[in-house]
Image (cartoon, rainbow, N blue to C red):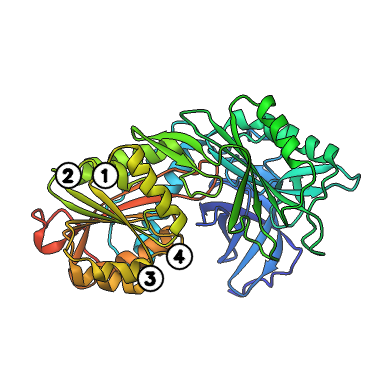
Amino acid sequence: MTKMIWQQGELIEVTIANLSDTGDGVGRADERVVFVPDTVPGDRAIVRLVHVKPKFAHGKFQQLLEPSPHRIRPSCIVADKCGGCQWQHINYDYQLVAKQNQVIQALERIGGFVQPPVDPVLAAPSALNYRNKSTYPLSTSATGQVQAGYYQKGSHQLINLNQCPVQDSRLNPLLAEVKQDIQQRGWQIYDEQRHLGQIRHLGLRIGRHTGEMLLTLVVKNWNLSGIETQAQEWLKRYPQLVGVSLNRNSDRTNAIFGSETRCIAGVPHLRENFAGLEFKVRPDTFFQVYTETAEALLQVIQSELNLQGHELLVDAYCGIGTLTLPLAKKVRIATGLEMQPAAVEQAILNAQRNRIDNVTFQVGAVEKLLPKMGTIPEVIILDPPRKGCDRAVIDTLRQLKPSRIVYVSCKVATLARDLKLLCQDGQYIITRVQPADFFPQTAHVEAAAFLALSNLYKDSNSFTKTEI
């Protein structure tokens, strides 16, 4: 049977059957795949083809003929435009199912694992009002009004927001009102095309358990007239605001934060309680965006490891010690490895603040520090950035042969790739994979994979082997 020739701009009818790892609906028409944002499995829709390839196409949702049973009304009035969320039109229970499937498919297709032991996704306590940190690009409207929000899907057009249903609701007054203060001060908004103007982003952060807040303006240079006076006004207006800072980013770049942050008023950090410990978190510190889900995943890690107090533990990519310090309380010695000196400095202070003295931190690349470990740790925690582990890290782990590895990942594609290498030749086995929902209303999913050295794992019939 001859396939029809698809034309850009053509309208076709598609039934959505799945969701891609980027969050788009996936349907088939004329034996070809069509990717359609803003759709849900079960939707029957009219779609306009916008990018056509020989075997697939990308389409734009035009008309809903029959809604999916998983489709709901979004909580946000600009959810169909704003690029901050992808899945507000999908009910939360189905979001969890889709995320579990995403992890399973990555481990099967990329990792080559057969029936990987993936648990149901650890659900978030709330699917809304959860983000403890939001960073908004700023722009100026056609009428000259200062705007803050997220970019429209597939464009560089800013959608102005006065509140956001996924950020902690206590931050909403700051989002709505700080724009007006910037307008009244006459501060110029940065124009990335011409590299002119001053203020690039508005950053808001809150301690979910303490309520302390930070406000940060990302600026092209430090010369922001009247910022000291305005910062004091903000501290008086918002009782929970403990610090106002400037971060300088003078480069032509898509990166949000520059390398230097200055506290203008108050203190340069907020206090947050995490897993029974107190942490100090700066505006540019990496800290999981959903505090409560991160705590719940840590509880799973602690339960699965069942630490007895005699172990040596290494936390690679440790950051400010968010995982290192709670786990250090349950082992004999813990070591954190981290590339960023500022993060290590904060980790050391956090250890001192919580009177944890069986932990040390080292600055440097994990692939260089790990081979120099004087002893072989029983447990290694891996929590790399989205790009995953450097190949040298994988090779070193296979040489060191720690009895257990916990790999915490924010991108399941690189998780699957690295697990395939670690499990090569049956050296390690996956005993459990626990996904966790750190980002409700989006396609992002976190996962913790538990690995055991195969010759030490007693119940050899209960693990899933790989097809490598």
User: Of callouts 2 and 4, which one flags the residue occurring earlier in the amino acid sequence?
Assistant: 2
Q: Which residue position holds label 3?
A: 390
Picture residue at 33% right of the left edge, 41% below the top? 352
In front: mark 1 or mark 2? Answer: 1
User: Of callouts 3 and 1, which one flags the residue occurring earlier in the amino acid sequence?
Assistant: 1
Label at residue 36: none
Apparent side of residue 444 relative to residue 122 in the rendered image (left or right): right
In front: mark 2 or mark 4? Answer: 2
Residue type highlighted by circle 4 = Lys
**How much space separates mark 3 and mark 1, taking CA atoms?**
24 Å
In front: mark 3 or mark 1? Answer: 1
Q: Which residue position holds label 2?
A: 307
Picture residue at 85% right of the left edge, 37% below the top? 184
Judge the density around disc 4: few (<14), some (14-19), many (≥20) Cα neighbours within 10 Å: few
Residue type highlighted by circle 1 = Leu
**How much space separates mark 2 and mark 4, taking CA atoms?**
29 Å
Residue type highlighted by circle 2 = Leu
Measured along the vertical axis of the image, is residue 309 above or below residue 363?
above
Q: Which residue position holds label 1?
A: 327
User: Of callouts 1 and 2, which one flags the residue occurring earlier in the amino acid sequence?
Assistant: 2
Judge the density around disc 2: few (<14), some (14-19), many (≥20) Cα neighbours within 10 Å: some
Q: Quadrant of the C terminus?
A: bottom left
SS assignment at label 3: loop
Q: Which residue position holds label 4?
A: 387
SS assignment at label 1: helix
Is the C-beta separation of discs 1 and 2 under 8 Å?
Answer: yes
Residue 404 locus on image (x, y percent): 20, 56
